[in-house]
Each structure stands twice: as structure tokens, then as C-alpha cells.
């Protein structure tokens, strides 16, 4: 039996049940290994106040979330050292790929976990994974040299095989596919592992590893018990700014159609069975009181229609008092979809507007969603009483300030129930990241990338301070329009200047790590 210590280096200061954690725990325990979790989320010296930041700028409604949480004023490093000394793990592992790949600070967890673990080089095998590990393992290991092994692609089976090898007292991992091995002679990569074709092949995800307060979640002005959840993995689209393209490329799905979809998409998309989903949701609801399932599926409505229809019938016939929040694209929302979403107990839908200029979306991002389809999808959901959240991006390479104005005006037309805006993040290995690097807007690798908390841009078209202004005022501008934009800018920057000189108080320009 091997001992594996998982680390959740989440810096957002609120509970996130990163999907890779229960997925790996379920498999490792099924194989007889001992697994424990060190969660850095609620250490005051480690976290930033993501809820406070996004409540202040209007993305979140105010709640009493913090009254449900006990924060730890101790030293995260000292407590981790004590945990390692007590547990004496064979492997310390953090960061991985699942459907939970776009937000919640997941992308940068590989570097934050490294900051916590590099001092334990002599005590355990340091193993990590995730998107950077998949895109550029040599570069990652040159920057984070104390890591022993990287797992590229999906890591559940590879990590379990590493644990099995340790249990057999083997220290040669070169026969395990999907690895980048950091050795004295440089980095050696093994062949890619097969893609997980059927998610039912993994044991039920084990959420018992989380402490109870992790389940509290702010949602639409309430505080409810929630989990991040996945029914499926994969997306049929290959938008040039999206981290999904890194995974597609790793598994050989690089050819696309004229409409921006990958070829052989049915071989890339995979899901759990309706019966398995119902079993997991029922367990989580009845044993942990979970009401909200924050589905992290990259594109919910590309799950096969047979799967969703059967699941909808099972959910509709159940007595589960639960609700789903899903993410999808407007192409999938039609009249026939709405009844199914209602039977699935879908309370809210998030959809990417990104930016409103259709030509830019299609020519620069290879995202083909017409204005008409977006408008129709938001209206259909509104008429059905399903809450709608629009996702927007500012700071994309080649996007000027006027594109932000157009995006604000388009959101006014859509009239969503909630509006979010993220700074563009240059995700390593994506076409847009490479372009931004060539233009000099970003470094080759940007540490501390987090679209919700900070911009790393040096874009000459839109000054970074101006991007921060639009992040802070985006929702207000959607509500009020652009008529008073110049006055709002003047007041905002005067307030920032006063704050920097020590006079008065102000909204933080952006959250820093």
C-alpha cells in the first residue's frame, strides 16, 4: 500500500471541490492505497479574497458566506510540514486535468503547489500534472525543477500505476505511459496514454476527502452546499484561446472543420452513464446535503442526447431537491432543449459571449457563434425561467477598447441575469498564447495567470490599468450604459491616485498573488 498526499493549493479563499481530487481519490482507494488531502484554501496568509473582489465589482451578489467558514491564521508551510512528517507520504501530488479546466484558478495550481512542496524533495516523490505539463513538460520542469514526474493528459490511471509500482518497490516508471520523467540526463517523455473512453471505468468519485466547510458555496445571493461536478469530458470545438485545444492536441485531435469543430469528435467526447450520474448525485445529496451541482463540463449540451434524455427522465422522477448550474454554447440551446433542461433541474446556464464582434470571434478566435444564435439562446432560457450568465473576456490580443464597448452594448441587449468578465489569460500551448507572445503582450510563460483576479497584459491597444477599470465597472456599465463612461473613468482613476498617495480608500486595482 502506497501513501499519497494530495495538495489543493487553491488561492481563491473559498471552497472549491476541484474535480481531479475526488476522481483520483476514488481510484487510488479502490486499488488499496492510502490517500489524504492537505487543503490550503482557508489559510489567511495564503489566499486572496476572490469573493470580496468579485462582489465589489458586481459579479457576485452579497452573501454571508464568510460566516460559514473558519479561516486558519496559522502558517500554511508549517502545517504542511507537520502533515508530511505525520503522514510520511510516498508521493505528493497536485494539479491535474479534468473537465474543471477553465476557471477557479485551476490553471496556475501547478506553480502554487510547487511553492508549497519544493522543500519536501527528500521526503517524497513530487508528482504533478495539468495543462502546462501536457503542453510543455520540458519547459515546466526547467522552471519547477524539483518535480520528479509530470503526468501529461488525464492522470488518474497513471498516478494509480505509479502508486502500484511504489507498492512493488519499483523506482523505474519508464513503462508507464503519459509521463515526463525529470532525470540527471534531462527530461524523458513516455508515449501518451490512451484517452479515457468511458468515465464509468473510474470508480465513483470520492468527495469524503474534503472537510465539511469546503461544500459551502455562494450562489445568487444565497449560501448553499455545493460541489464541482463532471458528467463528461471534452469539447467538440477548437477555439484558439481555449485550453481544451491543449488536450485535443495531446490526444491527436488537431484537424478541424470549417466551422471550428474537431474531426472525429465522437471519439473525443466521453461521459458517465445516466445511472452512474444519478448514483453519485444521490449519494452527494443524501450524505453531504449537496443542493447545487456546479457542472464543469466544457460544453454540457454536447453530451450525447441519449445520455441527457435518459438522465432527464431519471432526475424528473426522483425526489432530489437539487439544482444544476451548467455551461454550454448558444448553438445547443433550442426549443427542444428547454424542456430537457427543466427536467434536469437546471437552475442556471453560463454561456460565452466572449466579445461581441462576430468577425473578431470567427477570424481571430475560430469561435463560430452568430449574434442571432446568442440572442435567441438567451431569450429562450429567459422565457423558460432559467437564469442566464454571460461570460465575457477583455484584453485579447488585437482587441481594442472599442471592442469592449461593443461587448457591453451587446450584453445590454441580451439582458442576462448575471454578467461576468475575465481578463484574457495566455494559456500555454494555445494559439492565442503564442500570438500574444509574438506581439510582445505577454511573456513566454506568465506566472500567476488568473483571469478573474489579474491581467498580465502589456497590450499597447488597451492599457492594463484601463483593463482593470473595465473589470471593476463592467457590470455597472452593462446596467447603466456608456453615456457617462468618461466621467466614470475620471472618478475611478482619481480614486486610484488618491489611494496610492495614501488618501482615502478605494477599490483594489486588481487582486495580486
Image (cartoon, rainbow, N blue to C red):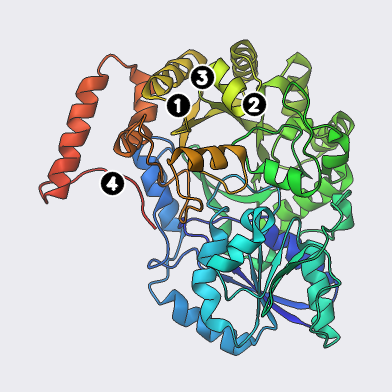
- Residue 235 at x, y = what percent? 74, 37
Is 498 in front, or is 461? Answer: 461
Report the mark closest to the observer, 1 or 4: 1
* Mark 2, residue position: 366
Element at label 1: loop
Gap between marks 1 and 4 measured at Cα: 24 Å
Report the mark closest to the observer, 4 or 3: 3
Residue at 27% across, 20% down: 485
* Mark 3, residue position: 356
* Mark 4, residue position: 508
Q: Is residue 161 visible?
A: yes
Disc sitting over residue 447 in the figure: none
Report the mark closest to the observer, 1 or 3: 1
Q: Is residue 354 left or right of residue 199?
A: left
* Mark 1, residue position: 399
Q: Is residue 370 above or below residue 422?
A: above
Gap between marks 4 and 3 measured at Cα: 27 Å
Looking at the image, is mark 1 or mark 3 earlier in the sequence? 3
- Residue 316 at x, y = what percent? 80, 33
Residue at 58% across, 56% down: 215
Amino acid at each position: 500500500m502506497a501513501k499519497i498526499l494530495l495538495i489543493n493549493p487553491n488561492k481563491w479563499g473559498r471552497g472549491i471541490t476541484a474535480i481531479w481530487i475526488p476522481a483520483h481519490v476514488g481510484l487510488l482507494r479502490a486499488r488499496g492505497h492510502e490517500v489524504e488531502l492537505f487543503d490550503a484554501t482557508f489559510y489567511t496568509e495564503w489566499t486572496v479574497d476572490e469573493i470580496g473582489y468579485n462582489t465589489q465589482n458586481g459579479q457576485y451578489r452579497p452573501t454571508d458566506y464568510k460566516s460559514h467558514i473558519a479561516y486558519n491564521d496559522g502558517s500554511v508551510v508549517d502545517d504542511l510540514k507537520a502533515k508530511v512528517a505525520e503522514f510520511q507520504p510516498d508521493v505528493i501530488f497536485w494539479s491535474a486535468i479534468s473537465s474543471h479546466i477553465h476557471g477557479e484558478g485551476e490553471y496556475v495550481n501547478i506553480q502554487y503547489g510547487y511553492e508549497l512542496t519544493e522543500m519536501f524533495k527528500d521526503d517524497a516523490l513530487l508528482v504533478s500534472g495539468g495543462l502546462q505539463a501536457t503542453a510543455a513538460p520540458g519547459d515546466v520542469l526547467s522552471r519547477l525543477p524539483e518535480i520528479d514526474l509530470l503526468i501529461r493528459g488525464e492522470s488518474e490511471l497513471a498516478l494509480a500505476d505509479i502508486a502500484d509500482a511504489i507498492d512493488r518497490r519499483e523506482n523505474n516508471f519508464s513503462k508507464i505511459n503519459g509521463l515526463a520523467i525529470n532525470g540527471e540526463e534531462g527530461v524523458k517523455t513516455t508515449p501518451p496514454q490512451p484517452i479515457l473512453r468511458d468515465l464509468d471505468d473510474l470508480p465513483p468519485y470520492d468527495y469524503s476527502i474534503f472537510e465539511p466547510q469546503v461544500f459551502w458555496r455562494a450562489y445568487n445571493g444565497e449560501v448553499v452546499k455545493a460541489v464541482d461536478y463532471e458528467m463528461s469530458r471534452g469539447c467538440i470545438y477548437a477555439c484558439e484561446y481555449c485550453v481544451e485545444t491543449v488536450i485535443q492536441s495531446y490526444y491527436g485531435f488537431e484537424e478541424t472543420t470549417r466551422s471550428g469543430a474537431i474531426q472525429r469528435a465522437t471519439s473525443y467526447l466521453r461521459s458517465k452513464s445516466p445511472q452512474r450520474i444519478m448514483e453519485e448525485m444521490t449519494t452527494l445529496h443524501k450524505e453531504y446535503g449537496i443542493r447545487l451541482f456546479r457542472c464543469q463540463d466544457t460544453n454540457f449540451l454536447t453530451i450525447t442526447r441519449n445520455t441527457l434524455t435518459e438522465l432527464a427522465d431519471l432526475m424528473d422522477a426522483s425526489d432530489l431537491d437539487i439544482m444544476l448550474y451548467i455551461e454550454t454554447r448558444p448553438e445547443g440551446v433550442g426549443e427542444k432543449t428547454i424542456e430537457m433542461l427543466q427536467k434536469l433541474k437546471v437552475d442556471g446556464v453560463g454561456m460565452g459571449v466572449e466579445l461581441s464582434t462576430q468577425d473578431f470571434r470567427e477570424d481571430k478566435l475560430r469561435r463560430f457563434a452568430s449574434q442571432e444564435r446568442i440572442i435567441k439562446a438567451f431569450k429562450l432560457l429567459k422565457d423558460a425561467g432559467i437564469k442566464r450568465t454571460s461570460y465575457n473576456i477583455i484584453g485579447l490580443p488585437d482587441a481594442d477598447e472599442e471592442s469592449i464597448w461593443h461587448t457591453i452594448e451587446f450584453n445590454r441587449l441580451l439582458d442576462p441575469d448575471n454578467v461576468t468578465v475575465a481578463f484574457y489569460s495566455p494559456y500555454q500551448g494555445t494559439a492565442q498564447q503564442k500570438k500574444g507572445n509574438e506581439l510582445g503582450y505577454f511573456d513566454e510563460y506568465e506566472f500567476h495567470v488568473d483571469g478573474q483576479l489579474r491581467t498580465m497584459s502589456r497590450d499597447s491597444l488597451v492599457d492594463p490599468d484601463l483593463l482593470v477599470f473595465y473589470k471593476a465597472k463592467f457590470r455597472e456599465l452593462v446596467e447603466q450604459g456608456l453615456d457617462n463612461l468618461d466621467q466614470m473613468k475620471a472618478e475611478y482613476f482619481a480614486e486610484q491616485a488618491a489611494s496610492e498617495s495614501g488618501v482615502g480608500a478605494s477599490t483594489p486595482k486588481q487582486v495580486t498573488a
